[in-house]
Image (cartoon, rainbow, N blue to C red):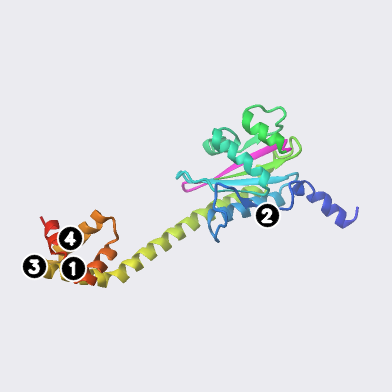
């Protein structure tokens, strides 16, 4: 067999669902930015298909207990397999998330545990699947591999996909921590930028009411809470008006 022919034979099962890059399902953002869960899931699904023999497609999902369920599939037809499991609460993905161990479906023609999942899978031509969970912190990532042939994926949980899944889960925890740190940094920066305006507003309130700095800040904060506006916005409005026309409102909030 020529080298080109051998390569074609080895990758044929993986191309059966078409040469599509893993795409986020409708449950996830359509255009993920670098580092977001959907991007990590897409990379995981694509790499898992490449390194697993007889695998025709893959789906990766993540759950963090917030209700959001990003997922990515290597072919659009496979997104239905995720949707039917999340709607019904039955199937390899919910079981793997609950038990924390791989769920192997050797032959869907014989396995009747989840009728809805089974019907959608067989309609897509899938005969076998295995779903592998990966946990890191409070995140649970699942990787589901599919095959057109029965009994071909039993060894997959012990292969390269184990390392791929562990790495993906760890990276997603790191990404989330990084995004949280950036958000906190933005908040601190906004607070620092707004501090001079808040100080000016406190000075105006102190002048109008003849109170101290703590009482003036309390007045601004109560206005912010009562009007559902940011403290910086309230302070800016007070500075713009120089406190004129607000005397009665200030006085009412000190009682």
Q: Which residue is mark 4?
A: 219
Whether the residues at callouts 3 and 4 have beta carbons within 8 Å, the answer is: no
Of the image marks 3 and 2, the number of the one nearer the N terminus: 2
Q: Which mark is residue 210?
A: 3
Structural distance between the alpha carbons of marks 2 and 4: 56 Å
Q: Residue at x 90, y 56 (%)?
A: 2
Residue 181 in the image: state x and y as whole percent.
41, 61
Q: Residue at x 80, y 50 (%)?
A: 10
Residue 213 in the image: state x and y as whole percent.
15, 67
Q: Residue at x 71, y 38 (%)?
A: 124
Whether the residues at callouts 2 and 4 have beta carbons within 8 Å, the answer is: no
Q: Which residue is mark 2?
A: 21
Structural distance between the alpha carbons of marks 1 and 2: 56 Å
Q: Which residues are magenta?
A: 125-139
Structural distance between the alpha carbons of marks 4 and 1: 9 Å
Q: Secondary structure at mark 4?
A: helix
Q: Residue at x 75, y 48 (%)?
A: 14
């Amino acid at each position: 067999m020529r080298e080109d022919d051998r390569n074609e034979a080895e990758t044929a099962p993986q191309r059966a669902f078409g040469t599509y890059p893993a795409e986020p399902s409708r449950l996830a953002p359509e255009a993920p930015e670098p580092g977001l869960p959907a991007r990590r899931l897409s990379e995981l699904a694509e790499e898992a298909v490449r390194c697993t023999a007889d695998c025709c497609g893959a789906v990766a999902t993540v759950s963090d207990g917030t209700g959001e369920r990003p997922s990515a599939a290597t072919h659009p037809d496979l997104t239905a397999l995720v949707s039917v499991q999340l709607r019904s609460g039955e199937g390899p993905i919910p079981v793997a998330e609950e038990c924390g161990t791989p769920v192997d479906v050797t032959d869907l023609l014989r396995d009747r545990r989840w009728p809805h999942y089974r019907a959608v899978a067989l309609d897509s031509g899938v005969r076998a699947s295995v779903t592998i969970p990966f946990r890191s912190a409070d995140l649970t990532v699942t990787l589901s591999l599919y095959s057109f042939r029965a009994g071909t994926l039993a060894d997959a949980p012990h292969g390269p996909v184990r390392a791929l899944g562990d790495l993906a889960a760890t990276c997603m925890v790191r990404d989330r921590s990084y995004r949280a740190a950036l958000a906190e940094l933005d908040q601190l920066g906004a607070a620092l930028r707004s501090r001079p305006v808040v100080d000016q507003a406190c000075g105006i309130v102190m002048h109008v009411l003849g109170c101290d700095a703590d009482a003036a800040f309390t007045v601004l904060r109560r206005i912010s809470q009562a009007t559902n506006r940011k403290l910086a916005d309230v302070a800016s409005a007070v500075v713009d008006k120089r406190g004129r026309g607000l005397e009665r409102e200030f006085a009412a909030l000190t009682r």
